[in-house]
Image (cartoon, grey):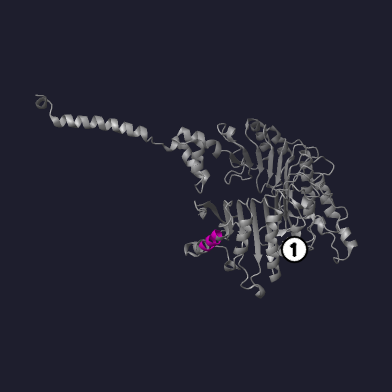
Amino acid sequence: MWSWIVPSGLIAWMSYNIFYSIRRQLRARRRKVVRFEDLDDDILLYITTFSGFTRKQRTKLSPVSRRLRRLFRPIIFRDVQWAPAFQAYTFPSDDIIPFIGSLTLLPYTHPMRRELRFDRPRIVSRLQDELPKFSALRTFTLGHSIAGGLWTELLEALTFAPALDKLVLFAPWGKSRPDSMEPFRLAENLRVPRLTCLIYESVMARSAGAGPSIVRRDTPMMEVEGENLRRLVTACHATLETLALPGEYLLQAIDTGVDWRRLRKLYMRGLWPAEVCDHRPSSPSMISDLASHEGAQTRILHVLKLMPNLRLLSLHMSVLRNEPDGVTYLVSTQTPSPPARNEFLHHLEEFEFASITPEEHILEFLPLGLESLVLTRFPTEELGRTLRQPILSCSQLEELLRRVQFPYLKKLTIWYRIHRPDDLDSEQRLLALLPQAFPLIETLEVYRLFDHTSAALKELWNPIPSFRFLLSQLSHLMRFAFNLDDPQRYNDYPFDLRSIRNGTYDQYISRLSQFARELVELCPSLRRVALYREAGDDAARYWQHWDVGRTRDGGAILTSDYV
């Protein structure tokens, strides 16, 4: 009867759909689908960092939904550039002002509207009106190519920003061309924000015409810039914790009559003060000449003694090629009044020194608690035709490190040269010394510059076995970077797009990968390894990096960064 009224096929079809719907709901509950927008904020931010253009990618994603806009807007508008003359002196929208943490002033003018010139009084007026709204603004940057440099009224207008504590200056006070406007002179009694960080980025002067690309600043520029820096640095010394200046102004910008105990980090870049080159001993044996030469070094030591609470001291300075050799040191065996041991910078934790010479003894006066020692070259690229960039031989470096004691050192960077077979013997002694002298090393960076033209060193280049054994002795080592100065790359140009396309670059990376595997095999604590390879146009990025993992049986697994 029922089978005649309701066909069995209909009953089967209805039963199937009912149970299928129930089964699908149960399956969806077990396997919850997570949409892109449902991911946590930190995961979304992490995913977008893999883009080669992170900021552009986040800008494209932000209009997709309110959730993404809320997440990405504070990051997109964290750093803002303001070109007032190009933008008709309008400020950023009030909607994004609460997100702005860094504001850069640029000098660009509108190409079609001559009336919109770079009007300094108008800029100051706009800043005074708008800066009180910038509750998150911590950094103000004076951009490149602003004629005349920083002026007093602009500096005083920055006091209207309630949270500003960092000032970065790219525009120098000097004249780039004879027809440039005269540089501004800052007032003697400045009203400044409560700056904790001051960075002057105009590290070295460049030649405007023929001749060396790097030159010393001329006397008029030294006088104006030196006095302006002195007034600016002195005005904010009571709150200043980080200071970065050109090395040429080390003796001119620091007022020895004020209290520098607040300062924690001092960065000096560029050229040594010209005073160190004023006197040159006619021979190393003439002590009287050498004593007269100590004036500039003694003054530098006096400046450093006024900063007893420094945690970081970075002296990345060189001298010009045509200037005297052997003058870039702070303490020598003939220094008339060396600093007292354990009383000189006794809170120092990080020390960086470029182009160290055999005459240097400053390391012997640094505190035992030093945690980071960087002995590098400035700049890191070879500029031998312009600058003196002395690099110690391996025997000289060995002698220098044997004189110091830093039992708590965690980071070490060293440069040395291999000139002759005796240096290879010194290298073995140096590598045996490192684990004994610095047993807690976590980060080690080594630049081993090999003389590939020496017939006596032919077939003696291979450093892998020696460094493999060294790494096995460093039980706390986590990061290792090595410029092994590969003979395959001697006197060759950096890799470019052509070498990448024809496979030459990949073949060389395979060679480096084999070196890396051999190096890390006996160092179970190692987490990161990098080998030097020249690719691109940025010397700071001349490294191939690998993350180091371990299999269950202890074997090394290298995972290369994407290049």
Residue occupying the far front of the picture: 553
| Residue type pointed to by label 1 | Gln
Q: Quadrant of residue 285?
A: bottom right
Mark 1 crowdedness (10 Å alpha carbons): few <14, some 14-19, many ≥20: some
> Does residue 514 belong to the magenta stretch?
yes
Q: Residue at x 76, y 35 (%)?
A: 191
- Residue designated by label 1: 396
Residue 354 against residue 10 in the figure, above or below? below
Residue 272 against residue 166 in the figure, above or below? below
Left or right: 435, with 226 as reference point: left
Query: Which residues, given as a range, are shown in magenta?
Result: 510-517
Q: Nearer the viewer, residue 513 or 550?
A: 550
Residue 140 visible in image: yes
Residue occupying the far right of the picture: 288
Q: What percent of the width, then of the height, locates residue 460?
A: 63, 70
Classify the position of the N terminus by image quarter. top left
Q: Nearer the viewer, residue 541 or 218?
A: 541
- SS for dot 1: helix
Residue 384 visible in image: no
> Does residue 298 belong to the magenta stretch?
no
Residue occupying the far bottom of the picture: 455
Q: What percent of the width, then of the height, locates residue 354?
A: 72, 56
